[in-house]
Structures are given as C-alpha cells and as structure tokens.
Image (cartoon, rainbow, N blue to C red):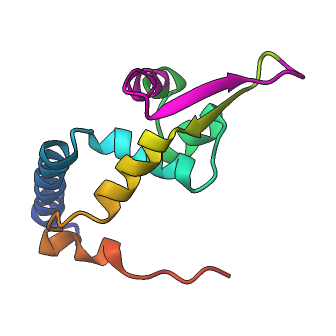
Amino acid sequence: MLDLCSIRKVQSALKRFEDTLKTETGISFNDALCLCSIKRGIHEPGLIALEMDLSPSRLTRILNVLEERKYITRKISEGDRRVISVQLTRQGDKIVTTYKCSEIEIPEILAFTQAETKTL
C-alpha cells in the first residue's frame, strides 16, 4: 500500500536538511551534489547531469555558480574543442571537506542514506 504521508515526511526532512546545508556552508544541495560528483571523478558535464538527473541547461547554471565562486574550473579539450572537463579547485575541494566533516544533523528519517556501502 502506498503511504504518501511517509513520503511527505522524507521530503520535508530533506528540505530542512537542504536549508541547514545552505546556512552552514553557503552552498545549495545541488551545488554540493555536483561538487561531490566531481570529487568522485566524474568530470564530464554530460555525465554529471545524468548522475544528478538534471537537464544539461540546469547543470550549466549550477556549474556557472560554482565557477563564479571559484569552486571549479572548466577546461576545453585541446584535441576536441567540443569536450569540456570540470575540475575542483583547492577552494572547491575545501568546501567538499567542509560539508563532509560538518556537524550538520541528518534527520532521523534520512539516516538510512548514511549507511556504509561496500564497493566491489
């Protein structure tokens, strides 16, 4: 049976978490997810958009903000000018460390997201 009220609780908890993240670090949830993807080694904007389930135009707006804040740089490939690579700057790497090491409380209903996952 579908329990929409429980889904709404998760949605509300996520919104509260997003607000706290923004207050504590100055970056939005999508900004943080994008930086996390880059930190994990995904450097092509198209692949980042796929991972985040965003349209390319929405990701471009996020990348523009991150670049303005000096968290990332974009580099055009010398071999193919259509290919762009995104890299974290030192400041970007520092902000990822800041939110990963922060004491931001994860709402109990979202605690399952923090379970350790094993990689093969």
Q: Is residue 81 left or right of residue 120?
A: right
Q: Residue 109's image quarter?
A: bottom left
Does 15 lie within the magenta span?
no
- 32 displayed left or right of 41: left
Q: Is residue 37 left or right of residue 46?
A: left
Q: Quadrant of the N terminus?
A: bottom left
Residue 94 position within the rendered picture, expressed as x and y whole percent measured from the top left: 40, 50
Residue occupying the far right of the picture: 79
Left or right: 30 in relation to 107: right
Closest to the observer, 79 or 115: 79
Residue at horizontal 14%, vertical 67%?
Answer: 105
Q: Quadrant of the C terminus?
A: bottom right
Q: Is residue 82 above or below residue 54?
A: above
Instruction: Spot the residue most to the top.
Output: 81
Q: Is residue 104 above or below residue 39?
A: below
**Percent coordinates x, y for residue 54 in the rendering:** 46, 35
Q: Quadrant of residue 99?
A: bottom left
Using the image as rendered, state which of residue 62 and residue 13 is in the foreground: 62
Q: Which residue corresponds to the image point at 31% horizontal and 55% vertical from the top-left?
A: 98
Which residue does the image show at 61% across and 79% down from the upper left? 119
Q: Which residues are magenta?
A: 60-80
Image location of residue 108, percent across then percent down? 14, 75
The x, y position of residue 5, in whole percent, is 9, 62
Does residue 13 show up? yes
